[in-house]
Image (cartoon, helix red, strand yellow):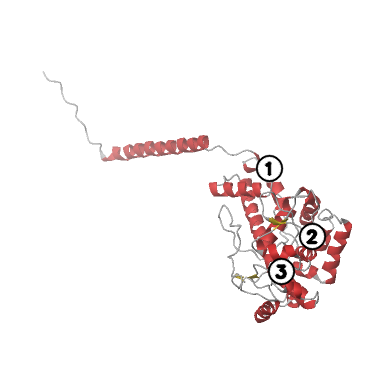
């Protein structure tokens, strides 16, 4: 006798509801289980970093964003490495004489007095080199005005780049304070910054003390002092505006009166903006200017304005003249009213123009 087949009875209408609910609960539990397993796997494969970049950051002190010169920053891009080669190279015959450059500035309505009174932004006009006949002009009002107007946009541009990096660094610090993991591009950018500014990997506080501006008045005064108002051979032949010594791997010009047994050179540059960038990086990294950076940082933390005359007092090691050098810088700042240019800003309405 054959066994009876099991008869599958279709659930009645009253039983269908509980069955569907049971299936739904089982499916929901399965999805939750998969989600938990996924989270555990991700945490295992990508553990949070330790130190300043990990979840251990419990507090970030807000810094008053006081920008000397009211620098107007462009939107920070997410590019991991910023292009440090600078602006597009201009034709060497763009402005060949002081007269031609003076006409260009006049056509643009570029006047230092208006810039100092904060009634006029600075046009984004970047010279690749100074006019060849600048050294032939006496050190009068015209020569000084041409010199300052030529260098001012470059100094502001470099400070703007530094401020962009500083703001981006604040963004990353805020993310890590919230326990958010930095993506690969951000980690690469941070590594490039630590190498460029010569700090230990992961030391964001040290980066903040170094990624900061050089007051416009101070940069202009040092450029005038070190280059002889653009008349020195190093300025004319190598765009060397700040008298920096060349590293072994850098190109440079040999001083004509270099003592026997000496091997140093003055670093040369293809463009003026490269010289300004190297100058800012030098002040922001060299151990000789630690007191300069410390004073700048304390001024920021106290909410004060960063001005060139004050920080000039921390550059006695920049020259063998020591205190006399500091006094010369301050005299240049005072006599030429350069402190008023600490409030200068680049025109956000004009395109970059290299001449």
Residue reaching furthest front?
260
Residue highlighted by disc 3: 152
Picture coordinates of residue 236, whole percent (x, y): 71, 66
Vertical comparison of 42 with 168: above or below = above
> Which disc, if any, is residue 200?
1
Tell me which corner region of the image, top left, top right, bottom left or bottom right, holds residue 32.
Answer: top left
Q: Is residue 18 left or right of residue 110?
A: left
> Which element carries disc 3, helix, strand or loop?
helix
Residue highlighted by disc 2: 304
Whole-angstrom CA distance, mark 2 to mark 3, is 23 Å
> Which element carries disc 1, helix, strand or loop?
loop
Identity of the residue drawn at 16% across and 26% down: 5
Report the quarter where the N terminus lies.
top left
Q: Nearer the viewer, mark 1 or mark 3?
A: 3
Question: Are there few (<14), some (14-19), or many (20+) residues within 10 Å of tag 1?
Answer: few
Q: Who is closer to the viewer here, 176 or 201?
A: 201
Tell me which corner region of the image, top left, top right, bottom left or bottom right, holds residue 144.
Answer: bottom right
Residue reaching furthest left?
1
Picture coordinates of residue 122, whole percent (x, y): 68, 72
Q: Earlier in the sequence, mark 2 or mark 3?
A: 3
Identity of the residue drawn at 37% across and 38% down: 27
Picture coordinates of residue 214, whole percent (x, y): 74, 60
Whole-angstrom CA distance, mark 1 to mark 2, is 28 Å
Q: Is residue 185 left or right of residue 288?
A: left
Q: Is there any visible trace of residue 155 in the rendered image? A: no
Q: Nearer the viewer, mark 1 or mark 2?
A: 1
Q: Who is closer to the viewer here, 320 or 313?
A: 320
Q: Is there any visible trace of residue 247 in the rendered image? A: yes
Q: Who is closer to the viewer here, 83 or 144?
A: 144
């Amino acid at each position: 006798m054959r066994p009876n087949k099991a008869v599958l009875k279709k659930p009645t209408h009253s039983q269908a509801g509980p069955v569907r609910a049971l299936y739904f609960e089982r499916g929901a539990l399965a999805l939750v289980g998969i989600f938990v397993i996924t989270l555990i796997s991700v945490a295992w494969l990508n553990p949070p970093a330790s130190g300043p970049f990990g979840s251990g950051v419990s507090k970030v002190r807000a810094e008053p964003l006081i920008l000397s010169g009211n620098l107007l920053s462009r939107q920070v891009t997410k590019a991991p490495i910023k292009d440090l080669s600078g602006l597009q190279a201009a034709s060497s015959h763009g402005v060949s004489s002081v007269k031609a450059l003076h006409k260009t500035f006049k056509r643009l309505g570029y006047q230092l007095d208006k810039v100092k009174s904060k009634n006029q932004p600075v046009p984004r006009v970047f010279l690749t080199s100074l006019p060849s006949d600048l050294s032939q002009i006496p050190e009068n009002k015209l020569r000084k005005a041409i010199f300052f107007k030529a260098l001012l946009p470059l100094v502001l541009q470099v400070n703007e780049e530094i401020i962009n990096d500083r703001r981006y660094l604040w963004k990353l610090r805020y993310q890590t304070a919230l326990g958010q993991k930095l993506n690969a591009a951000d980690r690469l950018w941070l590594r490039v910054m630590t190498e460029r500014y010569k700090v230990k990997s992961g030391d964001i506080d040290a980066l903040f003390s170094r990624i900061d501006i050089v007051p416009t008045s101070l940069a202009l005064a040092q450029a005038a002092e070190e280059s002889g108002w653009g008349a020195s051979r190093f300025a004319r032949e190598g765009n060397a505006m700040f008298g920096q010594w060349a590293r072994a791997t850098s190109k440079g010009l040999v001083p004509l009166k270099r003592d026997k047994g000496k091997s140093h050179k003055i670093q040369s540059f293809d463009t003026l903006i490269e010289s300004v960038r190297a100058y800012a990086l030098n002040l922001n990294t060299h151990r000789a200017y630690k007191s300069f950076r410390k004073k700048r940082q304390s001024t920021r933390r106290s909410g004060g304005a960063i001005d060139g005359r004050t920080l000039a007092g921390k550059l006695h090691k920049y020259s063998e003249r020591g205190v006399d050098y500091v006094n010369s810088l301050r005299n240049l700042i005072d006599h030429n009213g350069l402190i008023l240019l600490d409030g200068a800003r680049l025109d956000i309405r004009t395109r970059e123009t290299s001449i």
